[in-house]
Amino acid sequence: MGDAGDGLVMECRDLHKAFGDIVAVDGVGFTISDGETYGLLGPNGAGKTTSISMICGLLEADAGEVFVDGERMTTRSVEPKRAVGYVPQDIAIYPDLTARENLTFFGRLYGMGGDGLKSRVSEVLELIGLAERADDKADDFSGGMKRRLNIGIGLLHKPHLLVLDEPTVGVDPQSRNAILESVERLSIEGMGVLYTTHYMEEAERLCDRVGIIDSGKIVAEGTRRELVDLIGSQDRVRVVASGDLKSAAEAVDGLPSVVEVGEREGGLDLIVGGAASNLTEILQKTTGAGAVVTSVDVDEPDLESVFLHLTGRARRD
Amino acid sequence: MRAAFLIARKDLRQRLRDRSALVYGIIAPLGLAILFSFIFGPLDDAAFEAEYVIVDEDGGQISEAFGEALGGLEDDGIAVIRTVESVEVAREQVETGSDAFAGDDVASADAAFVIPEGFSEAVLAGEAAEMTIIGAAGSELSAQVAYSVAQGFSSELAAVDVAVRTVLPDAMAAIAQEGGTASGVSPGAEGAPGAVTPEMLAALLAQEAASTVNPITVEDVSASTKQLDSTTYLSAGMAVFFLFFTVAFGVSGLLEERRLGTMQRLLAAPVSRSSIIVGKALTSFALGILSMTVLVVASTLLIGAEWGNPLGVALLVVAAVVAAMGILAVVAAVAKNQEQASNFQAIIALVLAFLGGTFFAIAQVGGFMATLGLFTPHAWFLRGLGDLQGGELADILPSVGALLAFGLVTGGIAWFFLQRSVGRTR
């Protein structure tokens, strides 16, 4: 990797990792610049967490390299780890300690101390909305509060790269929104963020660039616009219907304008080339197959459409 | 090392806060030591004293000699001896001795020696002679002592008898030549040299038997043979037994970090893996030393345990903590999860404590079990404390060395495995 001065906070190249016969990561590589939020988007089991584990020095790569702030990251690295703030997917806090004690302990591990640590802990407690519960044991917190503390620990030492592994899984909408706002603020402050999620709307809202990972490989990468352009002028059509949806899906799948069809509860999801001119035909086929259509929504292409297009399947929650 | 201290400090705060270490490290061992010392402690202090009665229906020289031998017990403060006139009276007093509700003013006895008529004659004639001992129910120990006294006297009589018969011809020859007496034994009425009369033989036997060495000897052996009194033994035993639970809180912390998911954070932090392991070891060490120190001080103050030279005790405590850390670290290294580790550690703690004589002095059983005990830190710790009681500080060095060897060998094995397993986050 080049100098830190080139604006790159992290670069990983051709990462490979297998567990026995199972290939978890197969040639993953991407970069993150200062102040950039990079989304690693993919279904469960796609290789997101394994990639992140190698980037954070938790797991040794079978092949490939990771550089953080210009220094190579391995499991034995010490200095590169100072530049990384890691927020694991599962809540990783000490329940017997208070929020303040949790933050203080990890702050000290990262070399902080004295008044600087105290004021930073207070700052982070404010940021994650736990200032009033700072001296309560973490065990007494709600799930959302624990999640916020989980994130607070990761960003306490003002890392150059904040790595968040699906931080909003199982979080109530209010806490989720607070988390997303925090990440947006950090990015504005110049922190590089690596954000993994399988929620398309989060990736769309937060990420400057997105890498779509599936079966251990990055199948597409770019800004939201670039990714959407990959599927051209295709629209996403949601047909709300009842009746024989299976037959309806089979019927519309044969139409030349229909790129992808997904059957879901209460209707069909379609990727259609030129929805405006082909919608009548689609509806005719649908009703003709025995489905009763109650409404139709036509959306511009989004990451969900891109994902469906690139992986050939609906995302697995 | 800074990271290791930080981790240890955090762990200690957690352990003290959840109170589990306090329960295992101090409350349980101290409570049990106090309880056991109340139960077993009095055995140390209670002086043995029995009340015996003699029924001498014989009235011969041998029975008189036996009475004199029993007098030796009285002189030693072991027994009170009284003579009663009949077997019935003796039996009545022994029965009274069996009655726990009998008043102190009622004559009673723990055992009675009944010497039948013709006892001395039978002994002198080399025929079978029988002495009966009646023991009180509930005074088994006193009855056993009475039996041992009679056995000892009987054995001595047989030995004297043989000896006298062997040397007498020469002695009598000498007496005859000098025309005087030997050992206060008068020659026979006939005065013929070499002729041994029954009276002469009886006098010799009685003289020798009366000087029989008391078969029961009681002396304070605690200093000379380096044994712990029961209170100290129980305190030390409980302390080292629970040490294996207390120390586990530290080394098993690696598995707890994995369970909580915080191991990922530690591995992602700028600290070496060695620091994480050392941090957990420091926690174990601190908890072990704290627990043992509190127990030593508390048992000394509360129940009068006598641990011995403080420097020696400190050396043994440190060595025992190191040994426990090593053994439990191996468990933590190979266990798949915290629950499995806890089960393994409990089993190991119990087995080692049993073999090591924590619950009772298995070394006194001797043989294979005593040898097996040497493969436990518990045995070496208790042995070291015993050596400290009557010996020099240097006497405990073998025990300290053995304990440290346990710790270093098992700790080395644990380090090898932990270096590999610490990277596991799940």
Image (cartoon, coloured by chain):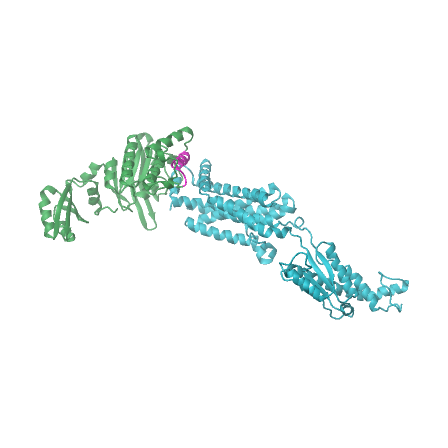
Chain colours: A green, B cyan
* Magenta segment boundaries in residue numbering: A96-110
> Does residue B109 appear to the left or right of B357 in the view shown?
right
Figure quadrant of residue A70: top left
Q: Is residue B317 on the magenta stretch?
A: no
Figure quadrant of residue B217: bottom right
Find the residue positioned furthest to the top: A115
Q: Is residue B83 above or below residue A63?
A: below
Q: Is residue A98 on the magenta stretch?
A: yes
Figure quadrant of residue B155: bottom right
Q: Is residue B424 visible?
A: no
Residue A315 in percent (x, y) is at 23, 46
Seen at 21% across and 42% down, the residue is: A304
Residue B126 in percent (x, y) is at 76, 70
Seen at 19% across and 43% down, the residue is: A305
Q: How many marks?
A: 0
Nearest the viewer among B139 and B370 is: B139
For the stretch drawn in magenta, what is the main secondary structure? helix
Residue A30 in percent (x, y) is at 28, 38
Q: Is residue A19 visible?
A: yes
> Does residue A100 appear to the left or right of A32 in the view shown?
right
Residue A299 in percent (x, y) is at 16, 40
Nearest the viewer among A8 and A151 is: A151
Seen at 88% across and 63% down, the residue is: B175
Nearest the viewer among B166 and A190 is: B166
